[in-house]
Image (cartoon, rainbow, N blue to C red):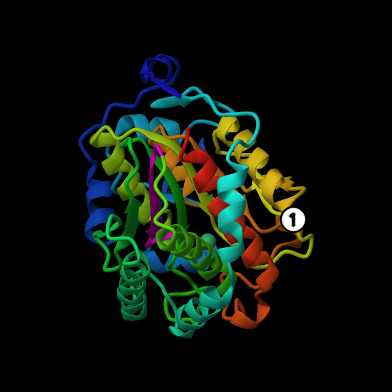
Amino acid sequence: MWTQALYAALLATSICSVAAAPSPAELANRKAGLRLIKTSPKSAGKWVSEEEKITKYKSKGIGFVDITDITDNQVLSALSAESDEGSFSAQAVTYPTAVSRQTQVNALLPSVSTTNPQSWLTTLTNYYNRYYRSTYGTQAGTWLYNTVVSVASANPAITVTKFTHSFNQPSIIAKIPGNSTNLVIVSAHYDSTGGSSSARGPGADDNGSGVVVILEALRVLANNRFKGKDTLEFHFYGGEEGGLLGSQAVFSNYKSTGKTVLAVVNQDMAGYSPSGKISIYTDYVDSALTAYTRVVATAYTGATTSDVCGYGCSDHASARSNGFPAAYVCDEPISTSSPYIHSPNDALSTIQWPTVLRHAKFTVAFLVEASYL
Ligand SMILES: [Zn+2]
């Protein structure tokens, strides 16, 4: 269920900056190839080089959004709102308080396995890195596109498209049409960083794991020719480590073309969990969708944990800043999460396959349940 809401509440309550002509300093920064990044709601932005984004921020665990190319004042205002300011939404959705498709889900779950994820993640981590501005990152994108096409071919109704960007790594979108064009989206970024543009960056947990999780869910639903009421999309983003670049472009497009999105569930890190529980994060997300996501995760995988992730943490922030309900599902609370991310040590050998299996089962369950929203 959903109702169309206006942005008026947000516009009325925020200081809406009108885009002024760029200053000479800004023009010089742009000409020099610098990027404007924002590290908190109150930050006005700071001009840094592409390399500094990784070496001075990402590798130090400082989240940011690259706002250089964002011209939509509603989105810029949303990116300046604190996480508990929930007034900005293009779609207000009422979510169920219990699961209702157990028979259908339980028929599919035995098909979920780690056989293919192990093979896919081996290939992904064998790229020297998947940095979004490197040739390796481009090669990984080509391989991923071909692999998504191959997995989707089990059901001719599924379409796979490349969403190209200003950088040389596309985002990739697979779509299982439903009876309605309303969208339920699961997402994961496939780029990686090892801590600098030239470092080895296997990106096993961050975020090869999330990629193989949603790819396994696509495989299971494609093989079973699943069709729900709502249309299901699987988003594989490029450029997340550069400040949520791929997801920003995709959701900006969805906003400007008026798409109806009922849910976006982002997974970034889904393969390392000492607690053995899915962790559902609660900041910079839609609280109602987050509650529903927890209902589904608990019903099909058992108890969950919670944490907060901070500003610009992952691609759910792009969905949210464009007015779409978004949730963030991770493998572990931050304090006990993988210590290897954003370094050359985020290796395949650190992946715990029961964790990947848990997330893949959750993803299948969520998609089936949410396809009847
Ligand atoms: Zn990540």
| Residue range of the region highlighted in magenta in the rendering | 229-240
Q: Quadrant of residue 251?
A: top left
Mark 1 highlights which residue?
277
* Magenta-span inclusion, residue 230: yes
Q: Residue at x 43, y 83 (%)?
A: 127
Q: Nearer the viewer, residue 104 or 233?
A: 104
Q: Position of residue 370 (x, y in %)?
A: 50, 39
Quick check: 81 left or right of 106? left
Q: Position of residue 178 (x, y in %)?
A: 35, 42
Q: Position of residue 43 (x, y in %)?
A: 49, 40
Secondary structure beneath dot 1 equals loop
| Vertical side of 275 occupied by 258: above or below | above
Q: Residue at x 42, y 74 (%)?
A: 130
The answer to whether residue 15 of the structure is visible from this angle is: yes
Q: Residue at x 63, y 48 (%)?
A: 309
Q: Amino acid at mark 1?
A: Lys
